[in-house]
Image (tube, helix red, strand yellow):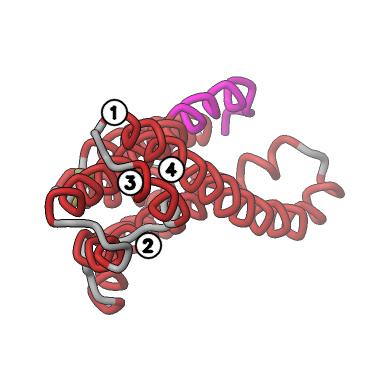
Amino acid sequence: FFYMGAVGILATPYLQLVTGFTALQTGMLSLLSGIPMFLLATFLPKLAPHLSSRLIIRTGFIAIACACALMAFGVHAHGVTGALFAGMALGGFGVGAVNSQSNNAVACAVTRKEAEQSGGIQGAARSIGLALGTALAGTFLLLTMAGGFAAQAASAGIDQSYVAPAAETASTLMSDSAFSDEARTWGADAAQVDKLVDVKASAQADAMRLSFGALGLLMAAGLLTTRHLVET
C-alpha cells in the first residue's frame, strides 16, 4: 500500500498535468494495475494452493521493484512511453500477489487469539502505508524537481532575471505549453522561453525517474523483511 500511494501521487499528476491526459484517460489507465491486482488477489490462492505464501510474497516484491524500474524508464522530458504503462501493469501483478497471501502470512505467524485481532491491525497498517507512500513520494518529487531545476538552470545560460520567477514554479508539475505561457509573462524572449521550457521539462522528468528509482530500491529492500515469513 506504500507503493500504491507513491505511484498514485507520482504517475497520476504527471500524466494529467505534463502529458495532457484527461481524468477519464488517467482513470482508464489505472485499470492496467487494478485488473491484475484484483485477479491475483482473488484467484491465486485457489489456482496455486501448493505454492508457499513466502515464495509468492517475495515474488510480488520483486515484481513491484521491477515495475518501478520500468516506470522510471518510461518517463521522458516531454512525455511518456509504453514502458510506464507496462510498469503499472507489472506493479498490479506484484501487489495482487502480495495481497493474496498477506492475511494468511500474518495469521500463521501469531497465536489464534492474536490472529483474531490481526484484521483490524492490518487495515490500519494499510491506511498508514498508503498515507506515508503518498506523503513521502510527493515530498521527494517536489524537492528533487526544485533542486534539479536550479542546477540545470545555472548551466543552461538562462538570464538570471528569469531564474528567480521560474524557481517559484520549479516544484510544480506543468506542461510545456503552460510553462511557456508563464515564462512569457515575465517578458522572456523566444530563445529564453525555449531554454526555460527545456530545463523545466528535463528537471521534471529527472525527478520522476529518481522518485521511481528510489521507490524501487525501497521495495527491493522490503525483501529483507520477508526472509523469516512462516512457510504455509
Q: How far across and down, in percent of the image, does residue 214 sit?
A: 45, 32
The residues tagged by marks 3 and 2 sit, at their Cα atoms, a distance apart of: 12 Å
> Is residue 92 found inside the magenta-colored segment of the image?
no
Q: Nearer the viewer, residue 180 or 76?
A: 180
Kindly identify the amino acid type of the residue bearing the numbered disc 1.
Ser
Q: Earlier in the sequence, mark 4 or mark 1?
A: 4
For disc 2, the neighbor class at 10 Å (few under 14, some 14 to 19, many from 20) is some
Residue 134 falls left or right of residue 153: right
Q: Please state which of the two labelled residues, at mark 1 or mark 3, is closer to the viewer.
A: 1
Q: Give the camera-side residue of 145 and 67.
A: 145
Give the Cα separation between the discs numbered 1 and 3.
16 Å
Residue pointed to by mark 2: 13
Residue at image coords 18%, 43%: 83
Q: CA distance from mark 3 to mark 4?
A: 44 Å
* Residue projecting furthest to the right: 113
Indicate which disc, 3 or 2, sits on the residue closer to the N terminus: 2
Label 4: which residue?
Answer: 49
- Amino acid type for the residue under numbered disc 2: Pro
* Circles 3 and 4: CB atoms closer than 8 Å: no
- Which secondary structure, mark 1? helix
Q: CA distance from mark 4 to mark 1?
A: 58 Å
Q: Which sits earlier in the primary sequence, circle 1 or circle 3?
A: 1
Q: Which residues are magenta?
A: 217-232
The residue that label 1 is drawn on is 155
Under circle 4, the secondary element is loop
Instruction: Name the residue tied to disc 3.
Output: 204
Where residue 17 appears, as percent x and y from the top left, is: 31, 65
Q: Which residue occupies 84% across, 47% down?
A: 114
Q: Amino acid at mark 4?
A: Pro
